[in-house]
Image: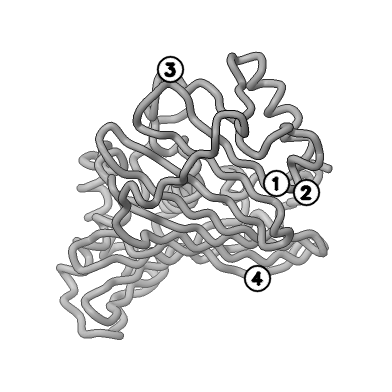
Amino acid sequence: MRKRPTAIFVLAAVLALASACGQAKAGTALPKGDDAADYVGAKFEQVIRKLDDAITGNRDVTNSLDAYLKFDDKWIHSVVTSARTGNPESRVVRHRSLKNPDEIIDTYTPADGTVEYTYLGPVYVQKGVSPTAWVSMPKPEAGLVQPCVWVGVMTACRMADSTVDAYQADKRAVRGAKSLGDGKTALTVNVPFGIFVKNKVEILPQSLVDQVGPELKKAMVPATITLNPDGSLVSFAMEAKFSGDGHQIELKYEFKFTGRASLQDMPKLPDAAQITVLPDRAAMNEFYRRLGEAQGS
């Protein structure tokens, strides 16, 4: 995996600088198009090298992701909420499908102990993924070394990577900046759908990836990053509706920080008798194989 420039916060710092320079009134448009690229680009280059540890330092927070994508008549829609708190850190991620409410997968990593937990919704228990809804397995030995690998922020990191890739490929991808109410600032960057697919913002089945031809790859997906006056991230959204190569695409993704996390955000575990124990890597691999089959059926 390539070294990340902690892209979400790179862009956050860029916009903080842009906002400070602009000092625009609420609702005032900052430079657009080529002017916006010149306005923000120089600051971008200055700050990108200084923010390698930004995601790691962003603790004790809750966040959410609303993810929707429709490819012709095939569609998915899910909401992912997560929380991380403490030092050492406890983490929880709750994944809910809005297409099928019984498709639930929660992961919980308590700060203490050597195991973490997964909670499965009724669909997966009925399909024989596990005899119980709760499953325990050994924690990764390395711990949370790369925060962007954690499911709670993985999609947001891939959205940010896609935005940075679009900027690096074409500095004119920055299409507009705007001062909002309460000192907030929003920046819009055009991201080619081909980059969205390549960076797996949504992990599409190969059968759909193979149908993404040159027209769809060039279609632009506006990414809007909204920041507080201090430069902290409010939300990161990608939304578009377009056609190409004989297909119709609609997508809407919004990641946002929602508050301060505490131990109250962590789930309560059931009695040990209600938890299926996966003692080693072999048992975990078999579990994930069954889960993958259930998700693909």
Location of residue 81 in the rendering, given as x and y in whole percent from the top left corner: 48, 54
Instruction: Specify few, some or many for label 4: CA neighbours under 10 Å numbering under 14, 14-19, or 20 or more.
Output: some
Left or right position of 269 against 215? left
- The answer to whether 251 is drawn above or below residue 85 in the figure is below
Element on which disc 3 rests:
loop
Distance from disc 3 to disc 2, alpha carbons, whole Å, reads: 35 Å
Numbered circle sitting on residue 241: 4
Distance from disc 3 to disc 1, alpha carbons, whole Å, reads: 30 Å
Three-letter code for the amino acid on which mark 2 is drawn: Leu
- The answer to whether 277 is drawn above or below residue 182 in the figure is above
Instruction: Specify few, some or many for label 1: CA neighbours under 10 Å numbering under 14, 14-19, or 20 or more.
Output: some
Q: Is residue 212 visible?
A: yes
Of circles 3 and 1, which is in front? 3
Task: Tell me which label, 3 or 2, sits earlier in the chain.
Answer: 3
Numbered circle sitting on residue 141: 3
Distance from disc 2 to disc 4, alpha carbons, whole Å, reads: 17 Å
Residue at the spot of label 1: 204
Task: Tell me which label, 3 or 4, sits earlier in the chain.
Answer: 3
Is label 3 in contact with label 4 (beta carbons under 8 Å)? Answer: no
Instruction: Specify few, some or many for label 2: CA neighbours under 10 Å numbering under 14, 14-19, or 20 or more.
Output: few
Element on which disc 2 rests:
helix
Of circles 4 and 1, which is in front? 1
Location of residue 100 in the rendering, given as x and y in whole percent from the top left corner: 73, 58
Query: Residue at 72% of width from left, 61% of height from top?
Result: 99
Three-letter code for the amino acid on which mark 4 is drawn: Lys
Instruction: Specify few, some or many for label 3: CA neighbours under 10 Å numbering under 14, 14-19, or 20 or more.
Output: few
Is label 2 in contact with label 1 (beta carbons under 8 Å)? Answer: yes
Task: Tell me which label, 3 or 1, sits earlier in the chain.
Answer: 3
Left or right position of 175 against 285? left
Q: Hey, which quadrant is residue 86 in on the image?
A: top left
Three-letter code for the amino acid on which mark 1 is drawn: Leu
Of circles 3 and 2, which is in front? 3
